[in-house]
Image: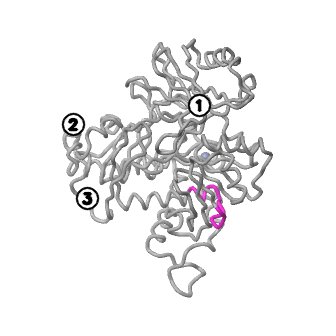
Amino acid sequence: MSERFQAGFDNVDLLRSAVDGMVWPSVPDGAGAAALAMQFQLAQSQCWSPEQLLSHQLQQIEIVLRHAFAHVPHYRVVLAGAGYQPDRKLTREHFAQLPVLTRKAVQSIGAALFAVRMPAGHGNVHAGETSGSTGMPVVFRSSALEQLMWNAATLRDHEWHRRDLGGRLAAIRFAPGGGMTPGWGPATDVAFKTGDCPVLHIETAIDRQVDWLCEQNPVYLLSYPSNLAELARAFIARNLTLPRLRGVRSVSEAVRGDLRGLVHQAWGVGLTDMYTTKEVGYIALQCPDHDVYHVQSENVLVEIVDDDGNPCAPGQTGRVLVTALHKFAMPLIRYEIGDYAVPGEPCACGRGLPVIREILGRSRNMLHLPGGELRWPLCDLVKEPELPGIRQYQYIQKSPEHIEVHLVVGPQYTRVLEPTLEAIVQRRLGYPFKLSIFYHDDIARSASGKYEDFRCELPG
Ligand SMILES: [Zn+2]
């Protein structure tokens, strides 16, 4: 089946060579060779059947469980309580009976989730922290081996989307000070000589971002979905283009509304999104042929479950549970990461990697209806024809019946429009919420640079 995909990189001439006088074929150094060797295996396993993938995942999880039971204080207790037998072959049914580990639990368990001993060959263990835009970061540990998996998945992403690795990548992200990095980042640069990467801080005013991008004239643009939407609108409004641009990449936030259409309208190129987290690495990558995501089954086992813990059918929204296959420093088994997603039917591209149709983001970004129902609040006020002049908006749900609407408006907007705004918001959100409207010069991003257009502040 692998013949169906055009395998390999367009830029083999950009492979780094560690040996003097040897430019073709290149001789990669140890880290480069390891990343390419892993990526070579991923190129095979993407074609496996779902059954074949699952049996390899269970085989790997069996080893993680044995390690967790022996060397991780929290799992020693929890697995014993769940009737875990280390010498038993792990089946799908046994796995589904293992307890779920919530994000909140990870925060309260703390160091008892860290392994007191590591298997040989996993390299240095480092500590990290998720960005925690709610003020509740997760403290985690990862090994050098997990970095190797990260590098391999990064290379897969480039290969899938046939990127020109020598091109300039402009990044607008959380980077106070900005600057210019000599390459796309360590995960790619480990194997390839990449193009340069000018970086601008996400808090820069949009018009300044537009001018900067026109100066940089990049081949690729990377930013957060909320920022890309504003940028695309600004390019359309100012009738500007980026003539060399081949693709837009999004990270960090959920892609909402019609961002893909907007990116296409502004720059005539596609949007490629990815689903990664600091604590478990790559969860899913966008299919190169269709606007869906493929789970990175070689790194994680993903379950999408309903409120009763049963697997969701394609099209049904559920909670994301992730099991990291190589996380020995801090095993995360059936870890409820806090995101909601929608599984999809098998992809027509032929890859056996499971499909996620949509990644909806965090539960704190969901609307809570007074009856208890949770919903994705899609109510974009910027492109609303009846409400001219709205430049930026943010909803904050303060109680089951009360929502604050924070706005940044231009001269076209007047307060006479408030009743129209209230009617539109109530209709779209599906309930006659009490609305309080506030006006600002600017609505700030969170400390990590992410923007939440809807935030629910109800307890729990
Ligand atoms: Zn596909």
Q: Amino acid under label 1?
A: His
SS assignment at label 1: loop
Residue 184 appears left or right of 400? right
Mark 2 belongs to which amino acid? Gly
Q: CA distance from mark 2 to mark 3?
A: 24 Å
Image color mode: one colour
Image quadrant in which the C terminus is located = top left
Which residue does the numbered mark 2 point to in the structure image? 83
Marks 3/1: CA–CA distance: 52 Å
Q: Is residue 312 visible?
A: no
The kind of secondary structure element at disc 2 is loop
Asked whether, in this view, residue 123 is left or right of residue 18, the answer is left
Q: Any atom of ligand 1 within 8 Å of the CB at mark 2?
A: no
Rendering quarter of residue 234: top right
Which of discs 2 and 3 lies nearer the camera? The answer is 3
Give SS at disc 3.
loop
Q: CA distance from mark 2 to mark 1?
A: 56 Å
Viewer-proximal residue, 261 or 444? 444
Badge nearest the viewer, 3 or 1 = 1
Q: Which residues are magenta?
A: 157-168
Q: Which residue is mark 3?
A: 118
- Which labelled disc corresponds to residue 440? 1
